[in-house]
Structure formats: structure tokens, C-alpha cells
Image (cartoon, helix red, strand yellow):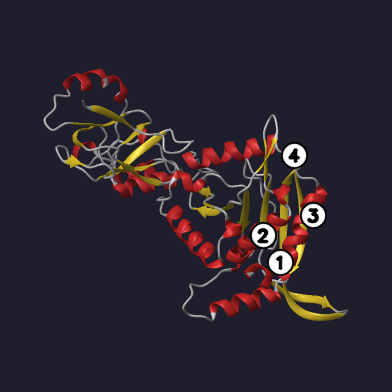
Amino acid sequence: MAEVIFMPRLSDTMVVGTVVKWHKKIGEKILEGDILAEIETDKAIQELEAEYNSTLLYIGIKEGESAPVNSVLAILGSENEDISSLLKQNKINNNYKRIFISPLAKKLAFDKGILLDNIKGTGINGRIIKKDIERYIDNNLDDKKSSNEVNHSNIRKIISKRLINSKIESPHYSLFIEVIMDNLIKLRDSINEKKYLDKISFNDLIVKASALAIKENTKINSSWTEKSILYHNNINIGIAVALEDGLIVPVINQVDEKSLRQISFEIKEKVIKAKEKKIKSNELEGSTFTVSNLGMFGIDSFTSIINQPNSCILSVGSIKKKPIINNDKIVIGHTTKLTLTCDHRIIDGAVGSDYLKSLKHLLQEPLNIMI
């Protein structure tokens, strides 16, 4: 029996999906586990796998087209099977306006926040091409305007909703601490001198140290619910990654149990996948603590909004060279400023302070990170 495959909801915030590529053609046989298509969500590009052996009988959404979740994506069944009745039954599901657009035009429109409904395509079969977007921009550009209006992207809308909810639901407060980083710098340099290893970043070391400090202060690894406080057994660290159109938080699971090399590899891999929109939704879920590092942008210190349902987020500033006091003598050293923002419903000041104390000790005596 033929089966209708609908546009899947590949993330908890997905409303519309775009077919980036079909890996199968109509009439082609499909084996269980084969990749049918690549679907772009509001967060990433994900592969859609076949769940059983079949034949592709119908494609409802072509490459480059976008459609709401639960629209008819395809029909799978036996070779030469009659699917006319299924097409008739599901006609209402695809009652939406299809938009044909080239990849360059789509990127330009997305970057400029232009609604495609406003664009008339001049390409083949009414396809929107780059010149159509540029013409629309030129026609709507008014030099006398004091400001330019850019429509919200999907990811920006989601970020707005989540951050507002976090600030409303969680009573935020922040704790600040300065850490001497000279020993950590020496350790990193020593590790990176071994050319057979991939380069280790300061962020890798801080993420590992953050997890080890959580092991010493387990109340940090918690979430608030209406009925109870959840204390998580696994330490899963979310890494805030800046994209062109917003922020995304890939998750490294069970950080405390992994080697520094494993952590470094996973962070690099997931950051690349996030920037290429190829990260899967399950790689963005399940964090119990988040690290946001703006040190590479030259930011001395900052506070972050808690990434729900975490109870804390650690903000990491840049490493600065400055005079410091060591054994009552002024010497030149390197320091960084850390900010721990906490949900006061769960984490009291003393608990947050103890965590920062543990983290500071690990960073200033970093051989403990390697043990």
C-alpha cells in the first residue's frame, strides 16, 4: 500500500521546511536507510531517511520549494502502484503558494529580510532570480528615509521569544570573578607544541573545566519545573555559536567523561555544522549548562541571558595582559573575567559562588583539568 510522506517537523520551532535536494527520482527504488531528501529548517539542513523499502511514486515539493509542516512531501509505495486516490485525498494538504527561487536570490532575500510574496519572478517559469531581488531593493530604497526596515527572520523570532520567556520566568542575577590565566596559557602552549594533536583552544579548556566544576557543585546542573527541581546526572554543555542571522547552541554531551581532545573535536565539528546549517536537531537539545565566550571578539566581560531550561550560563571574556599582585609584588600577568548568571529560584548566591571558586581553582591550577 502506498503511503503519503508529509513535511516532517524536524525541530520544536519548525513551521516551514524547504527541500534543498532530492536524492531520489520518481520511479527509483528505495532501500531502508537511504537518504530521500535534504530539508532545511529554521536551524539547519537535515537528511530525511527512508524507513522501509519502497519506490518513489510522487514528489509534492520540488527542490528549492518551501512548504508548511505536514504538507505532502512525497508518496512511497510499490512499483507502478496507482496513487490517484491518494493524490485526490491529500490535495487539500498542499493548498499553499509555491515559491520558485534560485539559491543566490534566496540567500540575498533572507539577508535583507525581504518577504518573497512581494517579489515577481522573471526567470524561467516565474522563478525568482537574483536580479529580481536586487530590483526590488532598488525600487524600495528611499535615500530620504532615516531608517531601513528589515523583516524578522525565523531564527530571530525564535531567539526573541525564548529570551523574553527566559527573562520573564527566571529571576536573573550575576556573579563576577577574575581569574589569572598564566598557567592555563602555559598548559595550552605545551599541548599545542605536540604537532600530532589538533590545536586546543582556550574555550576547549574552559568547557572541560566548567564540567569538572559542576561535578564538585552538582546543584548547578539543574532545571526548574512547576512541581520540582530536576537534578541532571549527565553534564551536557551547550556552546553558544554566533551565526549571521542569530545564535545557536550545539550541545556536547557528558563533557566531564570525555578527554580534552574529544571535546575539542566535537566543538569544532558542531560549530562547522551549525554555520553550514547541517546540524541535526538532536545535537541542539539536552543541555544542562551553557558557555558563551566572546573573548575572541575582544569583549572584557559581559552577562548573558540563561538558556532555558538551564539554571546557569557562564560568560567568558577576553584574556588581558595587565599588572597583577603576586606574593605582595606587582608582576605582569594575564587575566580573564568570568560571569555566572543564575536562576535565583534554584541557585542561591552561595551555591553560585562555590561553583566559581571551583572553576577558578581549576583554571589557575589547570593540570587538574587533565587528570
Does the residue at mark 2 contact the one at mark 1 (Cβ under 8 Å)?
A: yes
- Residue that label 1 marks: 362
Q: Residue 293 in the image: x percent, y percent?
A: 61, 59
Task: Give the vertical position of 147 relative to 215 (above or below).
Answer: above
> Closer to us: mark 2 or mark 4?
2
Confirm whether residue 150 shows in the render.
no
- Residue that label 4 marks: 171
Describe residue 266's horizontal placement relative to residue 164 as left or right.
Answer: left
- Residue that label 2 marks: 212
Kindly identify the residue that appears in the image at 16 percent across and 40 percent down.
28
Does the residue at mark 2 contact the one at mark 3 (Cβ under 8 Å)?
A: no
Element assignment for label 2: helix
Sequence-first tag of 3 and 1? 3
Q: Residues within 10 Å of mark 1 (few under 14, many from 20)?
A: many
Q: Residues within 10 Å of mark 3 (few under 14, many from 20)?
A: some
Q: Residue 371 in the image: x percent, y percent?
A: 64, 69
- Residue that label 3 marks: 353
Which quarter of the picture shows residue 171?
Answer: top right
Q: Residues within 10 Å of mark 4 (few under 14, many from 20)?
A: some
Does the residue at mark 4 contact the one at mark 1 (Cβ under 8 Å)?
A: no
Give the quarter of the figure containing the N terminus.
Answer: top left
Dot label at residue 95: none
Sequence-first tag of 3 and 4? 4
Sequence-first tag of 4 and 1? 4
- Look at label 3 and name its amino acid: Ser
Sequence-first tag of 2 and 3? 2
> Closer to us: mark 2 or mark 3?
2
Q: CA distance from mark 2 to mark 3?
A: 15 Å
Q: CA distance from mark 2 to mark 1?
A: 8 Å
